Amino acid sequence: MLPKDEYISLSSYTPLLQWDDLSFSIPDKGATSTTILHNITGTLNSGEVVAIIGPSGSGKSTFLKLLNRLLEPTRGKIQYKGQAIDKIAVTELRRQVAYISQRPYLFPGTVADNLAYGAQLWNLDYDGAEWLEKVDLSPTLLTQQGDNLSGGEQQRLALARSLLLEPSVLLLDEPTSALDIHGTALIENLISSYLHGERAVLWVTHDPKQAKRIAHRIFLMEQGRLLYDLSVEDFFSSNAPEKVKTFLTVREGNY
Amino acid sequence: MSPLILLISLSFVAIALFISYKEQLALEKDLLVGTIRAFIQLFVIGYVLQLIFDLRSLTGILFILALMILVASQNASQKSSFLPRSIALTYILGALLFAEITTMGLLLILQIVPVEPQYIIPISGMIIGNAMIAAGLTLSRLQSELASQKGLILTALALGATGRQAASSAIKQALRAGMSPTIDSMKTVGLVQLPGMMTGLIIAGASPIEAVKYQILIILVITASTAIASITVALGCYKPFFTSQHQLSNYYPRQ
């Protein structure tokens, strides 16, 4: 694993994803609607990991799902590599901008069947045993039923299933929230080694310590609004905005 | 059978009434209403059929068939708990129409059945009735599978699957649910009970072998019509649950 500062210096800082004035509402019964996200603007640059933190219900997952069109914004524009995402075939967009859910969902069948799912959609050749090793799973598991795996193993399998499609952007929705320290460290290392060339990661986490370990920048979200977009140094500095300090105090005590 | 004998046969209802009264089942009212409705409905359809048989009019036959399909579609679309009734009704109407035209068409073209109302109408009744049950089962299973597989389906979409690919397992389960009652009943027919049509033919004086031939024909035709109805409903009704951009639509079933 490269130290965080090195891979960021290698990157060219071109925006991989840009979003402008994004809002998302869901219709209620009747004519009204509830707004989940309000006017969010920002970028994700090549080579960086951005952590999104905020209380639950602040719209973090919804925001991730807008970026690869699992959800459609009510308002606003998103660009991937400088192109409006509604001009890109949506399946191709999702292959390149991968979303990995908080809970791993495995398809019925073996570990090999699961690895094959995305690869078959895209006619890709891949080495299943090699991919298992990359996510620290034994290649002997290939013939095992997916549901025999532990929670942490399932999450790593789900990651391998997405990573073998070689996406440029990873949208991670709290992938380690159900894992212990060891399982969490495995995933964090895995994501670091994935990050090279024109790639970037947007990582929702509820844990400020994890954000500090993995991220270059941090978005603080609250009630569907992006409150702050700060470098990790500024976020944890003594000069951080009051709201950031309050959030950190409430979460974990002092930093 | 003389009308007097039919009236005397009401004493069978009296047995059921007596049991209901004695055991305080409170079914007396339902029993009476049911008996009266059965008398009226069956006599009305009897006279209508007699009229059409006497007229031997094509318009009359088509009118009866259209009525059967409408009522059956209306009935099956009640299984729609998430899809708006009007959308479900449209797909089911199409499915039943398709099943009736294909199977009855083949029967007539291959000259298996003569172009006579007394053949076309009862056989159509069985085709449409069974297709109706299959369509309802398929739709309700499709909805429950989509609800329970929501996580997996989102995962498949996130890997770049189309709505059709993501829903394929739910569609298969729905098809099985629609078709298996007919297939199961094929396995036990004649062992557990004699089918109503065969019983009727035998009572009306046909030889058991002749009755069996018709029954086999009917079973095969019904198998085809339930298969056609199920596949039409499943492949049609999954569509409104997804958007054109392979997102879950607002109708998507919640658990």
Image (tube, coloured by chain):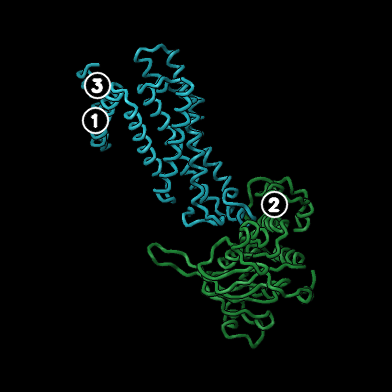
User: Image point 48% across, 41% down: which residue?
Assistant: B233
Q: Which residue is mark 2?
A: A122
Rendering quarter of residue A234: bottom right
The chain letter for the residue carrying disc 3 is B
- Mark 3 or mark 1, which has the lower sequence index? 3
Secondary structure beneath label 1: helix
In this view, the mark in front (3 or 2): 2
Residue flagged by tag 3: what amino acid is it? Ser
- In the displayed orientation, state which residue is furthest to the left: B4
Residue designated by label 1:
B40
- The C terminus of chain A appears in which quarter of the rendering? bottom right
- Quadrant containing the N terminus of chain A in the rendered view: bottom right
Q: Residue A94's x, y, as percent?
A: 64, 59
Q: Is residue B216 visible?
A: no
Which color is chain A depicted in?
A: green
Crowd band around label 3 with a 10 angstrom C-alpha radius: few (<14), some (14–19), many (20+): few
Relative to residue B8, is residue A53 depicted above or below?
below
Helix, strand, or loop for circle 2? loop
Q: Position of residue A250 (x, y in %)?
A: 57, 78
> Do marks 3 and 1 share a chain?
yes
Question: Along the horizontal axis of the image, is A137 left or right of B211?
Answer: right
Establish if A170 lies above or below A48: above
Task: Name the amino acid type tagged 2.
Answer: Trp
Determine the residue positioned at 43% across, 32% down: B130
Q: Is residue A85 above or below residue B44?
A: below
Name the residue nearer the viewer: B184 or A96: A96
Cα separation between marks 1 and 2: 62 Å
Q: Nearer the viewer, mark 1 or mark 2?
A: 2
Do discs 1 and 2 share a chain? no
Q: Which chain is cyan?
A: B
